Structure formats: structure tokens, C-alpha cells
Amino acid sequence: MEVIRGLSPKAGGSLAQSFVDAGILKEFTGQSRNRVFVFEEYLGSFE
């Protein structure tokens, strides 16, 4: 999100966490840095 939206890492992380809290995204790696998020509803449409 930082690269696409031109946000600082802190702002990008806060935005991503907001999406996780809202149930839109799911954090995939279990790490605290260099995290990967998925939009499960979108990925589920390919099953």
C-alpha cells in the first residue's frame, strides 16, 4: 500500500490494519514486518 498510494510505512501499516479489523483483508505471513495481505473474498471466487 505504501508504494501504490505513496504512503509512509507507518501510514500504510495503519491502513492495512484497518482493513484487517474490518474483515476486508487477512494477514498471510504471521510476521510483524514485510507482511503479505490477501483479499480472501476475491481469491475465493477462483475456487
Image (cartoon, grey):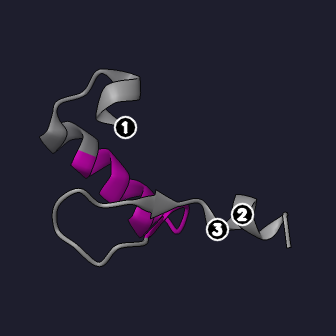
Query: What amino acid is at disc 2?
Result: Leu
Indicate the position of residue 32 as horizontal and vertical percent values. Answer: 17, 68
Query: What amino acid is at disc 3?
Result: Glu
Q: Is residue 12 above or below residue 17?
A: above
Indicate the position of residue 16 as horizontal and vertical percent values. Answer: 35, 52
* Farthest bottom residue in view: 30
Q: Mark 1 highlights which residue?
A: 1
The residue lying at 20 percent from left, 38 percent from top is 11
Q: Mark 2 highlights which residue?
A: 43
The alpha-carbon separation of the residues under discs 1 and 3 comes to 17 Å
Seen from the viewer's position, the closer of residues 30 and 13 is 30
The residue lying at 72 percent from left, 63 percent from top is 43
Q: Locate residue 28: give its quadrant.
A: bottom left
Q: Is residue 23 above or below residue 42?
A: below
Are the two marked residues, 3 and 2, in contact with CB atoms closer than 8 angstroms?
yes
Query: What amino acid is at disc 1?
Result: Met
